[in-house]
Image: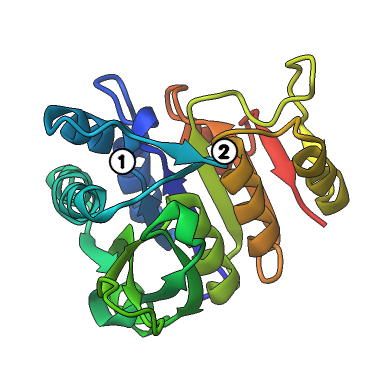
C-alpha cells in the first residue's frame, strides 16, 4: 500500500477543458496505484440554491443541517461520484465508486455542533480500498461517513470535508504521496506570493496567523495529518492542463509540505 498515490480532486477543478480524468487513466495504465477522493462543492451549492437554501461556511467547512445533508449525500455519493467513475471507465480505465459509508470505509462522529452534521474521521477501514486496489481498480471515494457517534436523533451518515478524508486515507494507507488538486496556484504568503516548500511548523504558523484562510485551512490540515504516514504532500493548481501527470513527473508547481 506504500506505493499508492492519493489524489484529492476538488469540484472546482473539473471543467470542460479539464484533463484530470485523462491523467488518472494514463497513470493507471502506467501501473500506478491510485485512490481518488473528490469534492463537489460547486454542484452542492447549485442544488441548494435551487431549493432556496443559502450555503453557509465556517472555517472553510460547510455548515450542514438536515436539508443540506440530504443534498450533500445525493450529489457527492450520486451525481459527482458516478460522473468521475464513468469518465475514467469510458477512457479505458478501471474504477469503482464508493462512499465512506460503504464497507464502513470512513467512520466519523460529529465534529462541532455549530457546524451541524459535519463529521471528523475516527477510523479508516482499509479493507474496501485494499480489495479494490488488489483487483486492479481505482477506488473513487465520496466524502461522506458512517456515523459511529452516540448523539441522539443524529443521522447515520455525516458530511465530511473531502480534504480531511484524503488526508486521513493517505495517513492510514501510508501513501507514497498525497496530491490535492485545487483552483489556486498553491499556498501563498500574506502578499499573495506562492510558497513552494513548507515544513510542518511553517504550515502550522500560516494557520495560526490567519494567512491561510477559507478553503486552504482544511487542505493544509489534511497535508499535516497525512504526514504521519505519507512521505510527501502537495497542493497544486488542478486547472492547469495535465497537472497530475506533470506532478508525478516532477514538473509541477504548487506547494510541497513535507518533514
Q: Nearer the viewer, residue 250 or 65?
A: 65
User: Which quadrant of the structure image shows residue 54?
Assistant: top left
Q: Earlier in the sequence, mark 1 or mark 2?
A: 1
- x then y, percent, for residue 234: 63, 44
As helix, strand or loop, the secondary structure at mark 2 comes to: helix
Q: Is residue 13 visible?
A: yes
User: Which quadrant of the structure image shows residue 153?
Assistant: bottom left
Q: Residue at x 55, y 75 (%)?
A: 172
Horizontal arrangement in the rendering, residue 247 relative to residue 65 (left or right): right
Q: Residue at x 33, y 65 (%)?
A: 158
**Mark 1 neighbour class, 10 Å CA radius: few under 14, some 14 to 19, many 20 or more:** many
**Mark 2 neighbour class, 10 Å CA radius: few under 14, some 14 to 19, many 20 or more:** some
Q: Residue at x 33, y 37 (%)?
A: 41
- x then y, percent, for residue 160: 41, 58
Q: Is residue 249 visible?
A: no
Q: Nearer the viewer, residue 200 or 139?
A: 200
Residue ID for mark 1: 40
Horizontal arrangement in the rendering, residue 68 relative to residue 4 (left or right): left
- Using the numbered discs, state the Cα–Cα distance from disc 1 to disc 2 in whole angstroms: 22 Å
As helix, strand or loop, the secondary structure at mark 1 comes to: loop
Quarter of the figure that contains the C terminus: bottom right
In the displayed structure, 58 sits above or below 192; it is: below
Horizontal arrangement in the rendering, residue 121 relative to residue 24 (left or right): right
In the displayed structure, 100 sits above or below 240; it is: below
Task: Tell me whether the residue at label 1 lies in contact with that at label 2, contact meaning CB atoms closer than 8 angstroms.
Answer: no
Residue ID for mark 2: 247
Amino acid at each position: 500500500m506504500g506505493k499508492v498515490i492519493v489524489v484529492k480532486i476538488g469540484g472546482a477543478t473539473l471543467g470542460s477543458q479539464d484533463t484530470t480524468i485523462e491523467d488518472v487513466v494514463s497513470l493507471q495504465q502506467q501501473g500506478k496505484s491510485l485512490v481518488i477522493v473528490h469534492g463537489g462543492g460547486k454542484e452542492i451549492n447549485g442544488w441548494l440554491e435551487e431549493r432556496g437554501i443559502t450555503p453557509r461556511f465556517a472555517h472553510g467547512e460547510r455548515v450542514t443541517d438536515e436539508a443540506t445533508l440530504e443534498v450533500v449525500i445525493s450529489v457527492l455519493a450520486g451525481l459527482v461520484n458516478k460522473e468521475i467513475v464513468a469518465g475514467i471507465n469510458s477512457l479505458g480505465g478501471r474504477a469503482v465508486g464508493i462512499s465512506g459509508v460503504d464497507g464502513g470505509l470512513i467512520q466519523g462522529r460529529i465534529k462541532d455542533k455549530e457546524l451541524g452534521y459535519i463529521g471528523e474521521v475516527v477510523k479508516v477501514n482499509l479493507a474496501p480500498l485494499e480489495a479494490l486496489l488488489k483487483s486492479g481498480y481505482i477506488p473513487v471515494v465520496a466524502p461522506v461517513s458512517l456515523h459511529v457517534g452516540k448523539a441522539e436523533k443524529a443521522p447515520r451518515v455525516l458530511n465530511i470535508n473531502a480534504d480531511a478524508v484524503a488526508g486521513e486515507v493517505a495517513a492510514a494507507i501510508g501513501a507514497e504521496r498525497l496530491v490535492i488538486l485545487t483552483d489556486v496556484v498553491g499556498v501563498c504568503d500574506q502578499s499573495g506570493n506562492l510558497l513552494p516548500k513548507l515544513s510542518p511548523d511553517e504550515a502550522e504558523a500560516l494557520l495560526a496567523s490567519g494567512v491561510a484562510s477559507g478553503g486552504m485551512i482544511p487542505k493544509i490540515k489534511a497535508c499535516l495529518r497525512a504526514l504521519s504516514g505519507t512521505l510527501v504532500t502537495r497542493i497544486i493548481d488542478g486547472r492547469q492542463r495535465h497537472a497530475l501527470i506533470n506532478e508525478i513527473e516532477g514538473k509541477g508547481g504548487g506547494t510541497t509540505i513535507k518533514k
